[in-house]
Image (spheres, rainbow, N blue to C red):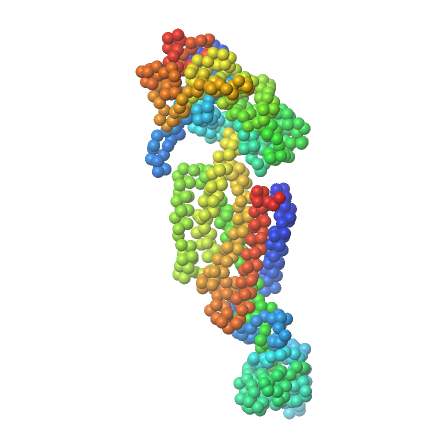
Amino acid sequence: MKALKNAFREILRYPAAVGGLVILFLLIVAAISAMIFIPYDEAISLWRGDEAVVYTNPKAVPPAWMNFFTSEKLPVTQVINSVDSPKVERVVEPHSDGTTDITLTYTFDFEYDRFYPEMVLYFDTTFDTKQPFVAIRWVTPDGTEIRVADIGVDRSLSYRFAQDDKLTRRLGGEVAEIGLFKVPDSDPPVPQKGTYQMRLEGLTFEPDSTIEAELVMYGMVHGLAGTDHLRRDLLTPLLWGIPIALSFGLVASLGISILGMAIAAVGVWYGGWIDEVIQRITEVNLVLPFLPILIMIGTFYNRSIWLMLGVTILLSIFGGQVKQNRAIFLQIKETTYVEAAKAYGASDMRIIFLYLIPRIIPVIIPALVAGIPGFVFLEAALAVLGLGDPVLPTWGKVINDASNNGALFRGLYYWVLEPAALLALTGLAFAMLGFSLDRVFNPRLREA
Amino acid sequence: MENIQKTDQNQVNTMDNASKNNGTPLLSLKNLHVWFELKRWGFAHAGYVRAVDDVSFDLHRGDAIAIVGESGSGKTSLMKTILGINRPIKGDIFFDGQSLSELNPRQLREFRSKIGFVQQDPYGALPPFMSVRRILSEPLIINGIKDPDEREERIRKVMSEVKLNPVDDFIEKFPHMLSGGQQQRVVIARAMILGPKLIVADEPVSMLDASVRVEILKLLENLQHSHDLAVIYITHDLSTVRYFSERIFVMYAGQLIEKSSVDGILSNHLHPYTDALLKGTSEPDANNAKIFKEVPPGEPPSLVNPPKGCRFHPRCAKMIDGLCNVEDPPEFEPAEPGHLTFCWLYKQNGHES
């Protein structure tokens, strides 16, 4: 215990270790907050990409912070819902004949250098038999009023600005997303910055009939992490990928190290046929093709990440680790203090656990820590090969989607670079920590 | 023929010791054979390494003996067998009249607690990751002393006995913080902590500085007298034997070839191998640098396939053809009583018992 405390104090003398610990700490904080703020069920639903959840996201766009690095500001998604948005002003005027005038005025700013690629108005109305009527009017910053459309609104109508041919004709052949925002008579079209207004002048014909509408202007950048081809916000898989990757790496590395150590210790201590059997199993296991077996299991049985974890551990406990540890144990077994322990009557188990294993811990711990990223990468590699968990959002799945959708050919670098950066960061943290631990535990490597 | 000789040997031993010390011996080795099996392809039998071949002797309470021999003569295998680490293939060890081969594992542990073990390399003999307190409490924990206060008391007592004073300065230390002499004192303390009746010391001072050697040997001598301990002192260095051993056994190729008092060996050794061994011991005399010492040619024989007859005969200048290379020599007592040797040279003047 005291030795551990001393080792920890010793670690803090290495800048690399402190750096590794800081990165690791940030990753863990991110993982915990992801699990708190995006509960598991919500994360799964976000990742499944249900239409109801993701319909307000643009398709495959970079993160919003890209705007900090470019002089040309790309439009950011704006979602204005008449139900709860303060940007909507509502005027209701009932008439004696049972009809009602409902006027919804949407006011919003537009300060970008490019046009929105897509705009949709989602209506949500209630009525019994006679559907309400809505006149859509558009007011640009210079005061020009444009008639957009006069339509009868069904219960859930999606009015897509670009698909209204009459509007396009009225705007002089320009699609609505450009025509409504451009500086008049500019050619090529230049966006006009300022405060816009959209007015919905509705008329209902029944006393309890209502009109609500959600204006969605899909941006060219979105959120903290961008979105993928299914409009899913990449923040979910990137954040939820942290706990999954860390636990996969940690459990695999820990399991393999501890089991491998125990197997090597038992083999060395009892020797004879037990050692022989362990050695032969290890040698056979070492030549078994690891990846093809995983691919076979993933294809024919189940692709659950936890099954993959179990198979990885099973296939690796009789691995190189056993050979490595065996070499060290053989040396320790012959030391005279083990002989002395035998002479004063220590039992086999006592010698293995209190005399052999404490000597190997300094070798195991750095190797264990430095080995974690290997398994994190393995999980990502499996996902890229199409063997990712079908349910859980992981970094590897993001990279897999990106490669399947030609992210790099389409210039969507963020899609590959974000999960790759997180993978690299994880690897860096554990490598820095592992190498420093190696120096702490193996004083011969220590700097003078 | 061989069987008869062995019976004879036993009789000599019993008679010899009975005359000196009454009662059952503390430790008694009877025709002890420690052979290690050689295997081919992991299972097929391919012969034995005869590390200890037909060794018998008795040891009484308070006696100290030295076993002398060169490397590979079977000293260490003999010691490990006495400690219960190696199992004899033939013959038996009796401790306090109790046969070791009849003990169950629990009794074997109890038996081991009655023997203290002092090793050659004190640093290697102490687990580097344990403090002195932990090192000394291990034997106590294993032997069922559960009360921590009692353990602490016994640890402190034994530490002051081996002169690790003041105890508080040493009890928290780790082996690498101690000097060689202090480490060896911890090893001795560990050997003493269970209150043994016998101490087996395997070259306890060969790794220490000359200045510390005498102190450690004196410490062992004091402990031997104050606790009435039997001591088996294993060494290849004849110069340290005199400190507390009364008798010397010379070992060659797995067998005892001469048993004598210390003075008997030093003044009047009988066996040609003992002669060679003593000649090999260097004295700090400047003239020695110019003298070429006569050493027997060749090397110790293979223990897998030892020479027929006397094992020293291929290297012996006084070999009698037709006798030494044919028959095992019996035990002769040509000089003073209690000085025994296995050598055909004494067939005429020694009375073969």
Q: Residue furthest front?
A: B290
- Can residue A124 be seen here? no
x and y, in percent, of residue A373 in the image? 53, 55
Residue drawn at the location 52% of the way across and 25% of the way down: B203
Question: What residue appears at the point 38 percent right and 31 percent down from the top-left corner?
Answer: B37
Who's the residue at 56% across and 47% down the image?
Answer: A438
Question: From what the image shows, is residue A367 above or below residue A131?
Answer: above
Q: Position of residue B103 (x, y in %)?
A: 45, 27
Residue B164 can be seen, yes or no: yes
Percent across and percent down for residue A350 are 52, 37
The spot of residue A76 in percent (x, y) is: 61, 75
Q: How many marks?
A: 0
* A348 lies left or right of A446: left
Residue at screen point 46% across, 29% down: B85
Query: In the figure, is residue B344 to the left or right of B162?
Result: left
| B296 or A20, nearer to the observer | B296
Residue A443 vertical placement versus A340 (above, below): below
Front one among B37 and A35: B37
Looking at the rendered image, the quarter that the C terminus of chain A falls into is top right
User: Viewer-proximal residue, B118 or A10?
Assistant: A10
Q: Quadrant of residue B149?
A: top right
Residue at the outermost left position: B322
